[in-house]
Structures are given as C-alpha cells and as structure tokens.
Image (cartoon, rainbow, N blue to C red):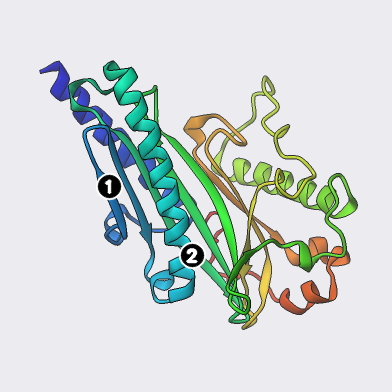
Amino acid sequence: MITRLSSIVISLQKFSCLAAALVLAGIAPTIAAQPKPDVAVKTKYIDASVTLDKQIRANAPLAENLLAEGKHWVEKNRADAAKEFKTSPELFRDGRAWTFERSYAQTSNVGDRYVSIVRTDYVYTGRAHPNTLIDTILWDEETRKQISIRPFFKETADTGPTLKTLRNAAIAAVKAEKKERGIEDSGDIDWYQGILPALLKVGAISLAPSTVAGKSAGLAFHYSPYAVGPYAEGSYTVFVPWETFKAHLSPQGLAIFGGDRPPDTKPDAE
C-alpha cells in the first residue's frame, strides 16, 4: 500500500511540476495540449522522450537539427542511467525508472528568418523533487544553423556595457514580476548573484514578438526554478523592451527590433 501511494505521489508531483513549467514558460496552456513524443525510450531504468511542437515539426531543417540534439541528450542520459542501474540498483527500487522529458516550443519568428525556441527539460532521478531546466535556441533560417544574439549588438564582451545593461534590465524585470506575483525576497539569499554580465550567464534569451510584422519588441529572459528564487516560485520569463538596449544595437540589430509587445501578451507568456 505504501509503495502504491508513493508512486501516486510521484506521478502527481511530476504532472504538476511539468504543467507549471510549461505554463510559466508560455509554452502550453495545459499538459493535454502537448503533442505525442517524436522520440521515446523506455526501459527498466529510464523513461525518456523528446517532443517538438507542431510549428517546429513543419520546418524540416529545424526539426532535423533539434531531433538530433534531443536524441543525443536521451542517449547520454540512457547510458548514465544504465550505469547507475548496474552499480546502485536500490535507486530504482519498486520498478522506479529515471525520467527525462525534453520539449521544444517555438515562441517567435522574426522576419521569417530568426526563430526563437524554448527548450524545457524535466528530469526526475528519485531525489526530493524533479528538476526543470529551461534554455533557449535561436535558429537562423537563412544559414540553417543555431546562432547567438551577438551579431545584433555592437559588442558583447563579458562585463562590457551591453551585458551590464541587459543584466540590470533582466534583474529589474524579475523583481517587478515577483512584486506582481505578491512575492517578497527575504534578503537571506541573493538570488541574483548568478545573473552575470556575460552572454552565457545573463539568462536564456529569446526574441519577443512585436506588434510590428517582422520585428521583435525586445528580449525575453527565461529562468529555471531555483535560478532567481526558491524552487516553489517556479520558473520566470520576463520581458525587456528593445528601447532599453537600443544604444547597444548593431545595424543588424536595429533592423530586427521595433514595435511594442502585443497587448494580449503577458510577461510570463512570451
């Protein structure tokens, strides 16, 4: 009876955490809306999957790129789980397998060239609670490659003026979002020390949609649970308008940014 109740609790915890992560990231209104996995692996020690949304599936080069990445991720975790299953079988007692679920969701397409994708990983290996990791990918339709946002700015040196501006704006946006949620930082922990003025440490960035066709209204910063607050606060997606960093944009950046965020778009649903 205890084993059965434990399994039910884990299933409910997995459902609620994944649902919260997807909703807060603006990826899906409900779990039911998620498509069937494009890749699925299930053994005694692992239950893994990779899922693309319908927009990505319709883009063959992009889908192929992301599926290759996703399959590599699944295989790495399968190998790790197999090793642990052999050396520490107690971690898989009661038939409990480790869970790895990755989803890719398109959040914007700027100028029919730059496609922003939010990648959400749900991982549960039997610890106190699951982990939800959020990252972003920027796809260039012209070169058919994953790229960074560096070309959109005059400079992106660590601790340089551009990244300092982005860091300060992102932190201010998170604090504003917390206030809107009715959350006050206790002051015991500096949750923002991990947000640094460096492109790979300022947050996962995507291009936000705009009221002007073919443009982006600014940057959306995506933070996984624990990144800027206790686990219970969940994930954060905040918006920084392009005017905030306009002075740092390169000619290429000035060409893609403009307009405002659509009025029906909330900060946590970019």
Q: Is residue 129 above or below residue 138?
A: above
Corner quadrant of residue 181: top right
Q: Quadrant of the N terminus?
A: top left
Left or right for 94, reference 34 = left
From where the camera sits, is residue 1 visible?
Answer: yes
Q: Residue 75: which numbered mark, if any? A: none
Amino acid marked by disc 1: Val
From where the camera sits, is residue 20 visible?
Answer: no
Q: Is residue 142 above or below residue 45?
A: below
Q: Secondary structure at mark 1?
A: strand
Left or right for 124, reference 263 = left
Q: Residue 41: which numbered mark, if any? A: 1
Left or right for 14, reference 130 = left
Amino acid marked by disc 2: Asn
Q: Is residue 196 above or below residue 160?
A: above
Corner quadrant of residue 80: top left
Corner quadrant of residue 218: bottom right
> Where residue 128 sits: x, y (%)?
39, 22
Q: Is residue 217 above or below residue 176?
A: below
Q: Nearer the viewer, residue 92 or 80?
A: 80
Q: Residue at x 56, y 50 (%)?
A: 135
Q: Residue at x 70, y 27 (%)?
A: 190
Decide: few, some or many residues near mark 1? Use Cα within 10 Å; few <14, some 14-19, many ≥20.
some
Q: Which residue is mark 2?
A: 65
> Where residue 100 sits: x, y (%)?
36, 41
